[in-house]
Every structure is written in C-alpha cells, then in structure tokens.
Image (tube, rainbow, N blue to C red):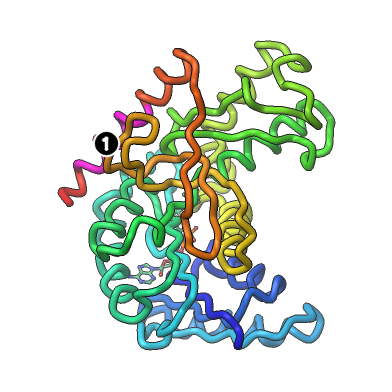
C-alpha cells in the first residue's frame, strides 16, 4: 500500500511540497487548506494529477479543507500560516500563526495521531514547540524544519563563493531559525578539505552573515512572501528519510532534553531521522566561542517560546 502524506497549508511551500512528493513518488498526497481556499487546493491537486503523465509518477493527489481526509497519514508537513513580508521579523508572525497552529494541532491530533510531523511555519522554533505541547505527541514524532534549510543555504553560498560543486560541501548550522543561528565553519569541509584551510576569515565571516540573513535576503527580493522552493525541498528530505528509513543525519529543530545544556526547548541540532522519526540527537563538542553563540540563540528561542504561554 502507498504511504500517505498530508500537507497542511497549500500555499507557496505547500504546492511545491506536493509537486516534489509526487515526483519522488513518496505516496498519495492530501493538500489541506482553510475552507475559503478549498477550491484552490483542489485545483492544485488536479493540476498535479494532470502533470503525472509527463512527470511519470503514480500518486493520488487531492485537495480538501476537511481534516477527515488526512486520516491515516504517515507524514504531516505543516506550512499553514502567514509568511513574512518585507520589514517583518519572524517573531512578528507569532500571534497570528500560533492561532493557526492551535487549530492545526487539534485536527492532526484527532485524525493523524500516528503521523510523523514536520513543522515549517514561522517563527519556527516557537511553532514546533507549540505544536508539540498542544498535541502531546512523543518527542520523536515532531521536528521543525529549519536547520536543514539553513545548512542548505550555508552549503550553497560556500559552493558559489569557492566555485566548487555543492555536492562536496558538508557542514551544519545549529540553533534557532533566526539571525543568531550558528553556522560551524570549523566543522565544514569541501571534499574532505577543511573550509578554514581554503577560505579566508573574511570570506567565512561574509558567508556566515549571508546564511544568517538568507531568508531576509529573499523576502527583500520577492517583495511579497518568503522563500518556498528551498524550504519545500528541505522538508521533503526529512520526510523521505522517515518514510524510507534512510537514517539521514540532518539538522532539525528537535526537543532537547539536556543535550547542549538545553532542556525543554526545540533547538536546531543534528538528528538522525529514521523509521521511528527523530531517533537520535547528536551532540558536538563545541569550543567556547561556539558555545557562547549557541547560548545566545537559545536565549532568543526561549523568549519567543515564553510568548506562546504554553
Ligand atoms: P503562504 O503561501 O501564505 O501559504 C500558507 C497557507 O496556509 C495559505 O494557503 C493559507 O491559506 C494556509 N492556512 C492558513 N491558515 C490555515 C489553517 N488554519 N489551516 C490550513 N491552512 C491554513 O505561505 P508560505 O507557504 O510561503 O509559507 C508558509 C509558512 O512557512 C510561513 O509561516 C513562513 O514564514 C514559513 N517559512 C518557514 C521557513 C523555515 O525555514 C522554517 C522558510 C520559509 C517559510
């Protein structure tokens, strides 16, 4: 039997998620949006069914506004919520998106209580925390997609700067999904060669700053809304690792229970995603400078989480 993927939110990211999931034949797909947008969700689903003959995939893709239709989903990816507009911080979205996540959590809890859940809605670290609290799902069943994207951006910028294949750039970004996130140049390599040996300090600082501000750079260019291709692919990578038990090690917002000195918060850390969901948090021995940077981003996440009052 095919797997089932429920996409809560059928906007910019939701529609790209549906397209990639179909092309990768990850399973049947339900795109769920609010009743006012049920027909656009149905329209996007139908359009994707009509793309199948040339896209070469078999998948049933449907649109809905009724949570009954997500029943039995193996994976739920949540993008429901407002995106940033130019001049906004992610935190500016807290009140409006908390209200949306509260409704989404109730629907998912009722109809897909076994699903592995990937949250994308911003402010990410607070929204994944809220979803976890509101559903009461176990820790391994809920992650936030942010580090996977932040690391993709870090890798892309390094490849662009050095003129090398992005496939050979490996590294990770820790912390909250905001301008205080922590790229780790010390542990970044290009085909096994340490980044710190082939790039100057000035280049590395510039790349780290661009990574921290990458979402804002796109928001400014778009003028309306935020990034959607790269966030969608980043969420798909997590979903695929779960569905196929690939056991990939990806930076995700995971509930820390003492790791990195953090307790009870979702923070971007390297985790292993397998058939049981978020199976393991990997702890990196950080140097003092990295520890201080992580502490700063944790403080920012803590403050936003407190505002959820959950
Ligand atoms: P957008 O194109 O506006 O799509 C959001 C969709 O959610 C719309 O179709 C809404 O109708 C729908 N929606 C609103 N309320 C509900 C509800 N109660 N139930 C179901 N659907 C609902 O936004 P987008 O797709 O560009 O972005 C979605 C979210 O992802 C935003 O909060 C962004 O800030 C966030 N985002 C996060 C990242 C990360 O890296 C974490 C990156 C980019 C965007």
Residue 245 shown left or right of residue 108 in the figure:
right
Residue 159: % across, % down = 76, 33
| Mark 1 neighbour density, 10 Å: few (under 14) some (14–19) many (20 or more) | some
The quadrant in which the N terminus is found is bottom right
Residue 306: % across, % down = 20, 41
Instruction: Name the dominant secondary structure of the magenta segment.
Output: helix
The answer to whether 108 is drawn above or below residue 145 in the figure is below
Residue 73: % across, % down = 46, 79
Q: Is residue 170 magenta?
A: no
Q: Magenta segment, which residues?
A: 297-306
Residue 59: % across, % down = 65, 85
Residue under circle 1? 302
Residue 135 shown left or right of residue 216 in the figure:
left
Residue 137 shown left or right of residue 6 in the figure:
left
Q: Residue at x 24, y 61 (%)?
A: 99
Nearest the viewer among 154 and 45 is 154
The answer to whether 146 is drawn above or below residue 131 in the figure is above
Q: Quadrant of ligand 1?
A: bottom left
Q: Residue at x 39, y 31 (%)?
A: 260
Q: Residue at x 77, y 39 (%)?
A: 166
Nearest the viewer among 41 and 69 is 69
The answer to whether 63 is drawn above or below residue 201 in the figure is below
Among the 4 quarters of the image, the one containing residue 152: top right
The answer to whether 262 is drawn above or below residue 228 in the figure is above
């Amino acid at each position: 039997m095919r797997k089932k993927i429920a996409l809560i939110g059928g906007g910019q990211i939701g529609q790209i998620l549906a397209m990639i999931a179909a092309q990768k034949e990850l399973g049947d797909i339900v795109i769920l949006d609010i009743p006012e947008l049920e027909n656009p969700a149905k329209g996007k689903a139908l359009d994707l069914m009509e793309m199948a003959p040339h896209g070469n995939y078999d998948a049933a893709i449907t649109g809905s506004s009724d949570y009954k239709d997500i029943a039995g989903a193996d994976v739920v990816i949540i993008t429901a919520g407002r995106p940033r507009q130019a001049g906004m911080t992610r935190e500016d979205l807290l009140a409006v998106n908390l209200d949306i996540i509260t409704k989404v959590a109730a629907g998912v809890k009722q109809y897909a209580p076994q699903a592995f859940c990937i949250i994308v809605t911003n402010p990410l670290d607070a929204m994944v925390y809220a979803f976890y609290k509101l559903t009461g799902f176990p820790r391994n069943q809920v992650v936030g997609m942010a580090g996977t994207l932040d690391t993709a951006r870090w890798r892309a910028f390094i490849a662009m700067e050095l003129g090398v294949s992005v496939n050979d750039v490996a590294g990770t970004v820790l912390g909250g999904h905001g301008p205080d996130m922590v790229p780790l140049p010390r542990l970044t390599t290009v085909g096994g060669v340490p980044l710190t040996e082939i790039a100057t300090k000035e280049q590395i600082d510039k790349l780290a700053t661009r990574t921290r501000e990458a979402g804002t750079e796109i928001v400014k260019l778009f003028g309306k809304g935020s990034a959607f291709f790269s966030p969608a692919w980043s969420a798909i990578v997590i979903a695929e690792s779960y569905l196929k038990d690939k056991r990939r090690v990806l930076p995700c917002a995971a509930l820390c229970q003492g790791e990195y000195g953090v307790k009870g918060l979702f923070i971007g850390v390297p985790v292993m995603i397998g058939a049981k969901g978020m199976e393991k948090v990997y702890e990196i021995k950080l140097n003092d400078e990295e520890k201080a940077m992580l502490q700063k981003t944790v403080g920012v996440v803590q403050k936003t989480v407190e505002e959820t009052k959950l």
